[in-house]
């Protein structure tokens, strides 16, 4: 970790410094009390979103050689080159350090963790609670699945029961070849931060990933702001058949640590993908915007740029090459409520990162 060029003496750093308000200098930072207890904003749907059961599709190999299933938030099952890659698996009920409060899942995962087909590798982008989920990792620890993580994150996994020989930690631009397959996983830059408890801010690295097979290339952003390094990622790992970018859980005053829908469109242009899939929405209320705002914004801008927008339902096993060019606004018609029920629903998130904004 200390030999990494990203190590800054007491923790990791971003190549491009993050400044609060950088995205919109005129935006006011919301008060913590407003974020925790404020009403309004249609922060979550009143009932579960439409979802499909992917098990039958998973029994058949993708005809194109590439298929992706969005399972909620940043959890995806990517089938590429004959292997299955699971990203940021979160099956737990809350994105929180405690069981009794914190951001509560409003959308169930469309399939049980134990019902997943055999997974060849799990990718962890960083150690925040909505990406590195203790109860999920504890259950995966009982299997033989290997993990690829950014530098330092493996210590969490070891302490939760994952054997060290099943963990590969990568610095940016390093890669890991999956044994017995022609598939390479490469860690790439992201502009974010890390930390789960007081005093651990940036003590582990955060990362995006490129996954390459003999026929296909995909990119998974993890959590990130807009960074000019996306052009370098395109040059080194592209061209991409599909990119999966975070679009939810953002605020104009939070600087460049999250993309949001508009910056995601700029990121797609830098990455130059044939198709792109928005993630990091539709599962938790982690910001003050309406739960469906990212989807609506992107639906209105769906013809922008040269990349094709794909917005599958939760659990819909999608082959990008065969996906329809038309986007179905399947999330419409779902009633919303003004705020998550129960005072302090977001408190656990702030306790976990001990920072503002929370993530």
Image (cartoon, rainbow, N blue to C red):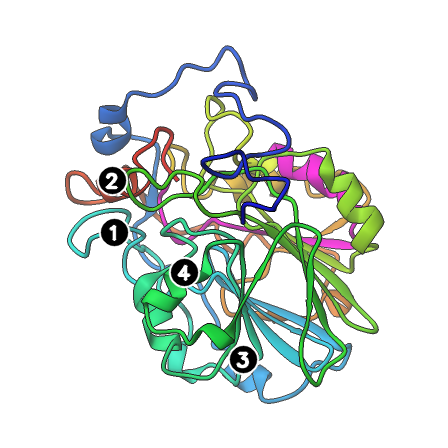
| CA neighbours of label 4 inside 10 A, class few (<14), some (14 to 19), many (20+) | some
Q: Which of marks 2 and 4 is nearer the N terminus?
A: 4
Kind of element beneath mark 1 = loop
| CA neighbours of label 1 inside 10 A, class few (<14), some (14 to 19), many (20+) | many
Tell me what residue is drawn at x 49 percent, y 42 percent: 248
> Which residue has dot 1 on it?
97
Q: How far apart are marks 3 and 2 (CA)?
A: 32 Å
Q: Earlier in the sequence, mark 1 or mark 2?
A: 1
Q: Which of marks 1 and 3 is nearer the N terminus?
A: 1
Label 1 near label 4: C-beta < 8 Å? Answer: no
Which label was assigned to residue 119? 3
Q: Which image quarter holds the C terminus?
A: top left
Image side of residue 155 versus residue 238, left or right? left
In this view of the protein, can residue 112 be seen by the observer?
no
In this view of the protein, can residue 99 be seen by the observer?
yes
> Which residue has dot 4 on it?
155
Farthest residue toward the top?
26
Tell me what residue is drawn at x 72 percent, y 82 percent: 181
Farthest residue toward the bottom?
59
Asked which quadrant contains residue 40, the reply is: top left
Q: Earlier in the sequence, mark 3 or mark 2?
A: 3
Image coordinates of residue 228 in percent, x first then y, are 73, 33
Tell me what residue is drawn at x 58 percent, y 83 percent: 58
Image coordinates of residue 354 in percent, x first then y, are 30, 35
Which label was assigned to residue 351? 2
Q: Give the range drawn in magenta.
A: 262-286
Label 2 near label 1: C-beta < 8 Å? Answer: yes
């Amino acid at each position: 970790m200390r030999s990494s060029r990203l190590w800054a003496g007491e923790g990791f750093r971003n190549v491009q410094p993050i400044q609060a308000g950088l995205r919109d200098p005129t935006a006011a930072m919301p008060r913590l009390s407003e974020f925790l207890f404020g009403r309004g904003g249609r922060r979550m749907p009143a009932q579960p979103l439409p979802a499909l059961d992917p098990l039958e599709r998973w029994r058949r190999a993708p005809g194109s050689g590439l298929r992706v299933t969005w399972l909620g938030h940043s959890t995806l099952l990517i089938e590429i080159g004959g292997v299955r890659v699971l990203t940021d698996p979160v099956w737990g009920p809350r994105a929180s350090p405690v069981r009794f409060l914190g951001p509560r899942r409003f959308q169930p995962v469309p399939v049980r963790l134990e019902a997943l087909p055999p997974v060849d590798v799990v990718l962890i982008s960083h150690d925040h609670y909505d990406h590195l989920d203790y109860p999920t990792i504890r259950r995966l620890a009982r299997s033989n699945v290997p993990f690829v993580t950014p530098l330092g994150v493996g210590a969490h996994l070891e302490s939760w029961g994952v054997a060290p020989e099943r963990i590969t930690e990568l610095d940016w631009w390093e890669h890991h070849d999956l044994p017995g397959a022609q598939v390479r996983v490469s860690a790439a830059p992201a502009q974010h931060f890390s930390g789960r408890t007081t005093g651990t801010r940036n003590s582990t690295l955060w990362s995006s990933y490129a996954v390459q097979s003999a026929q296909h290339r995909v990119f998974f952003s993890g959590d990130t702001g807009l960074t000019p390094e996306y052009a370098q990622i395109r040059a080194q790992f592209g061209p991409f058949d599909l990119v999966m970018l975070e679009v939810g859980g953002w605020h104009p005053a939070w600087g460049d640590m999250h993309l949001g829908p508009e910056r995601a469109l700029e990121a797609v242009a830098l990455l130059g993908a044939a198709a792109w899939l928005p993630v990091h929405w539709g599962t938790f209320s982690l910001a003050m915007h309406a739960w469906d705002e990212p989807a609506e914004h992107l639906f209105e801008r769906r013809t922008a740029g040269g990349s094709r927008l794909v917005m599958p339902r939760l659990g819909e096993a999608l082959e990008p090459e065969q996906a329809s060019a038309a986007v179905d606004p399947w999330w419409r018609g779902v009633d919303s409520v003004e705020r998550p029920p129960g005072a302090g629903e977001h408190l656990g998130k702030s306790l976990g990162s001990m920072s503002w904004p929370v993530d």
